Image (spheres, rainbow, N blue to C red):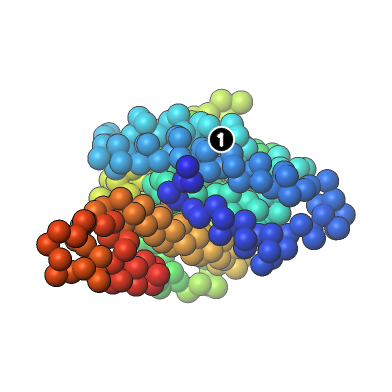
């Protein structure tokens, strides 16, 4: 039986007939890949979405995240599917093998993970933001930053976030007040508060790497004076992970994604939050747009996946729900009831979807 998250026939039509991705095998980069390999990826993605992620969706939303003493716990039922997602190498499926990925074409990776968002968006949000943070480090990070943080993020061992918004700085990002003070060793001491941070704190992974916009002391006003910092929840000291003075001050309660913690994050309440500059000072907005633009594309994919699931569930219900006779026999009391998909107006609505 076909899954109720993506139209498998439609996905393959788009990939193989509309986009003709089999032609990619004529390029050096994808010469070792094939339609059979693409199909295998799709089938495994749909199986993981249906068998593991979807069953945790309703239960996870009912249970929700729990915030206590500055720490967040996710629904217990999320741990198994996330572990399977991580071990399956889904997060870097389209990244180069050199950075720990599987090297598949981006379009194949997106087609595969579309079902994850449809099956359990709350759970998939953890992975989407992690990929964005890892990609940011791949493009702008130093070799040391990549080995310390990027490798862990792409492997799914750690998660990542994007921290822009503050209580007084929403769309007006230039009004942010989070402060970065230079330290003698080249690091920065960070202090400030960020709000509406998706997956800002949780217990799915042992560490979370925050990509944080802040202003170095003496920087120009507005967006021209914004820098971006790598701030782990726990920093490495002598090979051990220690607390980095990043505390969750509370979580939002958002309809439909109670399993995804949208957090208030306080940095440096005890003057012990250490950040590492990504790129150069005052280049934070330009660098962050790499992650922001990826997030925008993922938002589009979320809409697509939800629309797909809504349609497929509606179609299944319309084929099973018997109500009323055929339109041609409306006045016949002896006429048998038929599935509502036979009714013209129901068909019209399904066709519109």
Q: Quadrant of the C terminus?
A: bottom left
Foreground residue, 55 or 282? 55
Q: Is residue 345 left or right of residue 20?
A: left
Rendered location of residue 89, percent (x, y) = 62, 37
The residue labelled by disc 1 is 86
Q: Is residue 28 left or right of residue 346?
A: right
Rendered location of residue 178, percent (x, y) = 42, 58
Q: Is residue 87 left or right of residue 335?
A: right
Foreground residue, 216 or 332? 332
Q: Tell me the quarter of the picture where residue 324 sits.
A: bottom left
* SS class, disc 1: helix
**Which residue is at 25% across, 65% downward?**
326
**Which residue is at 66% across, 41% downward?**
40
Rendered location of residue 174, percent (x, y) = 45, 71
Residue 124 appears anywhere in the view: no
Rendered location of residue 171, percent (x, y) = 40, 71
Work out whether 16 lies above or below 249.
below
**Which residue is at 28% across, 67% downward?**
343
Foreground residue, 151 or 122? 122
């Amino acid at each position: 039986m076909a899954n109720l998250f993506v139209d498998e026939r439609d996905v393959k039509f788009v990939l193989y007939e509309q986009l003709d991705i089999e032609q990619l095998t004529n390029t050096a980069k994808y010469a070792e890949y094939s339609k059979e390999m693409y199909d295998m990826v799709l089938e495994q993605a749909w199986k993981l979405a249906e068998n593991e992620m979807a069953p945790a969706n309703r239960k996870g939303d009912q249970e929700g995240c729990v915030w206590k003493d500055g720490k967040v716990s996710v629904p217990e039922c999320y741990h198994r599917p996330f572990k399977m997602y991580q071990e399956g190498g889904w997060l870097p499926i389209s990244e180069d093998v050199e950075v720990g990925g599987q090297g598949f074409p981006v379009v194949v990776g997106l087609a595969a993970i579309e079902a994850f968002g449809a099956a359990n968006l709350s759970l998939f949000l953890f992975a989407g933001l992690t990929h964005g943070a890892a990609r940011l480090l791949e493009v702008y990070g130093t070799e040391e930053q990549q080995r310390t943080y990027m490798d862990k993020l792409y492997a799914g061992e750690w998660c990542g976030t994007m921290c822009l918004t503050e209580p007084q700085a929403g769309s007006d990002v230039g009004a942010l007040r989070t402060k970065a003070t230079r330290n003698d060793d080249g690091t920065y001491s960070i202090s400030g508060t960020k709000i509406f941070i998706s997956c800002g704190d949780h217990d799915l992974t042992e560490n979370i790497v925050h990509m944080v916009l802040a202003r170095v002391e003496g920087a120009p006003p507005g967006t021209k004076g914004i820098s971006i910092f790598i701030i782990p929840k726990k920093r490495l000291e002598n090979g051990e992970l220690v607390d980095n003075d990043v505390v969750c001050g509370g979580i939002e309660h958002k309809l439909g994604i109670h399993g995804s913690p949208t957090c208030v994050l306080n940095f440096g309440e005890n003057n012990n939050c250490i950040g590492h500059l990504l790129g150069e000072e005052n280049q934070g907005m330009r660098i962050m747009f790499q992650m922001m633009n990826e997030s925008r594309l993922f938002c589009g994919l979320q809409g697509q996946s939800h629309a797909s699931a809504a349609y497929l569930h509606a179609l299944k219900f319309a084929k099973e729900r018997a109500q009323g006779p055929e339109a041609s026999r409306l006045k016949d009391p002896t006429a048998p009831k038929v599935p509502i998909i036979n009714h013209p107006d129901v068909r019209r609505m399904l066709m519109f979807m």
